[in-house]
Amino acid sequence: MIRLTSLSRALFLLGLLSAAPLLAQEAPQRAPEIATGFQEKQAAVAHKYMAAAANPLAAAAGYEMLKQGGTAVDAAVAIQMVLTLVEPQSSGIGGGAFIMFYDGKKVRSYDGRETAPASATEKLFQLPDGRPMSREQGIVGGRSVGAPGAVRVLELAHKAHGKLPWKTLFEPAIRLAENGFAVSPRLNALLNWDKHIRKDPVAGPYFYDEQGNARPVGYLLKNPALAKTLREIAEGGADAFYKGHIAKDIAARVQGHPSNPGGLTVADIEGYQPKVREPICTDYRVWQVCGMPPPSSGGLIIGEMLGMFAIKDLRPYPPQKGELQPEAVHLFSEVGRLAYADRDRYLADPDFVPLPGKGVASLLHPAYLAKRAALIGERSMGRAAPGKPDDLNVAWGTDNAIENPSTSHVVAVDAYGGALSMTTTIEDAFGARMMVDGFILNNQLTDFSFASQDEYGPVANRVQAGKRPRSAMSPTLVFDKRTGELVLATGSPGGTAIVNYVAKVLVGTLDWGLDVQQAISLPNFGSRNGPTELEAKRAPQSLIDALQAKGHQVRVIEQTSGLQGIMRATVNGQKVWLGGADPRREGVARGD
């Protein structure tokens, strides 16, 4: 359990928000979920149960289920259905999800990642001459749509861990879809920014008026088509989505796209199956940190980073007066380079591609991580090469997947000792830019590498029929090793940067003693084995100068995380749940 002297440290946050402005910065990378501001938030407090999500209406739906006696899984189902409506750019029933769930005794991992159609080949995102397609050619249209997994995986988890009737969990979303919800500032900003969703014959008239203007902030937006879809799933279970007219509607839209049709069929959708996988749990100081196994890279790569942080200790370098210390950013970024190098070489769907050596154990072996950490010096290494575990028995090329950051994260703890961390996504903002039966279709297949091989061999994450694309999604649960007590549930959207965002919160809470909201609110930073990235408007020039003096190539960019977290703490001698939501998005935590 983490002990805090207060619920917030106002002076810390004041310093954080008043960091010196940037004197110079590079043009931001194109971010599929654009930044829409930073609004300071305080940790929410609860004693029995709590849910946090990226939109207040979604968090309220989860809270409603918990208040009715539901479990964290019940809350997550209700939240996901509302997010489909109110945050359609980020996730929904047309996409997939990874779920970490703790029932008070055991941790389980649920894999609801989308799958490639049976017709897919490694040339799916290649031009006739073998060169990779452009980002836009790959994403927009039917080509990029995989068989959705969200509804099936939520049903699987609910059958195992739910208490409320399945039908009950859909009531908040159906009410909102029929009666309308107020368009949020973030949704409005993304509608104004995106140039493709307005072209869809179904989504265009829904999101824009006759003059082509995005629905304004506060506009009461109703979605009767989604209400009908949700009623059918509420009554008929996941089969109503996968084995009825909805599956046929999805396949018809995908195959019938006028400029970029895809190969997804009704059979691909009907045959989709979620998987229960063994979570990756690693020891870190006095804690055990559990995350998703492949095809997510989150649990393994965060495990690598924590193993190296145990050697390259960040505890002596906490934020000072709200500013990150250069040595902390240096060590965090160098560790990230080494971990991401392994990610890009070795990780993919384990049902198709073996991990090197003895698998997870080889990449998390203390001797291997000590050898990797020994490569970190006083100056930046620039770009790290992938490691070679002693029992390496595979040779793979380097991945070049797009992996865009349009995603959402949900956390919940219930009154029964259960906890859930779920990352859910349609991949790019508004996915494939296709709406069917009231929801947006994913473009998840662009999380595969567009190139299928290089001079080192075939790319592990290349497209193959029935395969699940690799992900960086990192739903994470943390426990006290001594007592087994849950300490923290967290996760984030953010494409490949998810790993860094979540690792930042782990370092902030476990090493620097911050509460979960403070850790989430810290500036984002790190390296994905390229430049050292600092969050725009949050990095003082003194930090940039200090890093450049250590040889870092610094890039100041938008880093729009969407972290949520719930943390166990003792405040004034009393155990409570503290809930945190990312100030970069619209999320909140609700609980009693």
Image (cartoon, grey):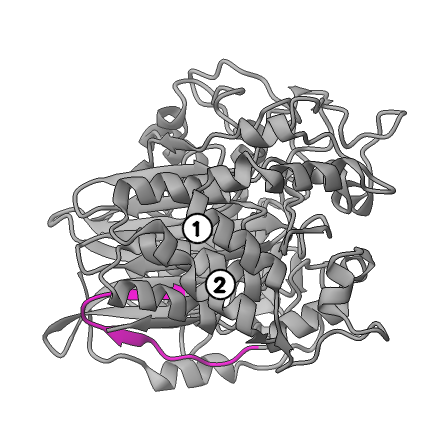
Q: Tag 1: residue type? A: Ala
Who is closer to the viewer here, 14 or 494?
A: 494
Residue placed most toward the observer, 587 or 440: 440
Please indicate, yes or no, whether residue 452 appears anywhere in the rendered image.
yes
368 in the magenta segment: no
| Displayed quadrant of residue 488 | bottom left
In this figure, which residue is indicated by the disc labeled 2?
174
Question: Does residue 79 sit above or below 582 in this rendering?
Answer: above
Amino acid beneath label 2? Ile
**Number of the label disc, if any, that sits on residue 234:** 1
For the magenta stretch, what is the residue range? 38-52
Residue 39 location (% of width, % of height) = 51, 80
- Give the distance between the C-alpha atoms of the residues marked 1 and 2, in whole angstroms: 10 Å
Which residue is rendered at x = 48% and y = 37% of the image?
A: 239
Residue 375 position within the rendered picture, expressed as x and y whole percent measured from the top left: 48, 38
The quadrant of the rendering that contains the N terminus is: bottom left
In the image, is residue 47 part of the stretch drawn in magenta? Answer: yes
Check disc 2 and report its element: helix, strand or loop. helix
